[in-house]
Image (cartoon, grey):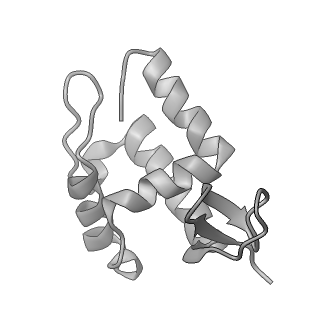
Amino acid sequence: MDNMLRQCRAHGHFSGTNCAVCNEEGKFIMSDREANSLGRILALVLRHAPEKFGVDMDINGWVNTRELSEAIGNQRRHYHWLRGWHFEAIANADEKVIGLLLQKIEHGNEV
């Protein structure tokens, strides 16, 4: 069975079935399959090809999360439910995405 990206009210986002701190199940955010796929899309957009999704990156590397979520939802219809706050959930729970974001910040870019 897939792990899931969830949110504990007290301790934030986590990947798994229960919060590691309080053992609460938490609110379902998305499946691991969805989070992994979305993580790959984020890497494509933020590292290589924002133009493929019609996303404008400013001079400092910032992208508007609402614009980004709409662009992904329009191009990948199965992500029609995606909102900007989902990126925060993935970043908080996924070390690879945190690394991508830190790498962008280290190079003078911000998300």
- Foreground of the two, 14 or 71: 14
Name the one closer to the observer, 29 or 2: 29
Residue depicted at x 62% and y 68%: 5
Residue 78 image position (x, y, % from top left): 41, 81
Q: Position of residue 21 (x, y in %)?
A: 77, 56
Q: Is residue 3 left or right of residue 106?
A: right
Residue visible at 60% across and 65% down? Answer: 8
How many marks are shown on the rendered structure?
Answer: 0
Above or below: residue 20 compared with residue 1:
above
Image quarter of the C terminus: top left
Q: Quadrant of residue 26?
A: bottom right
Left or right of 17? Residue 97 is left
Q: Residue at x 22, y 48 (%)?
A: 55
Image height check: is 58 above or below 5? above
Task: Identify the image quadrant of the N terminus.
Answer: bottom right
Residue at 79% x, 59% y is 20
Residue 6's x, y, as percent?
61, 69
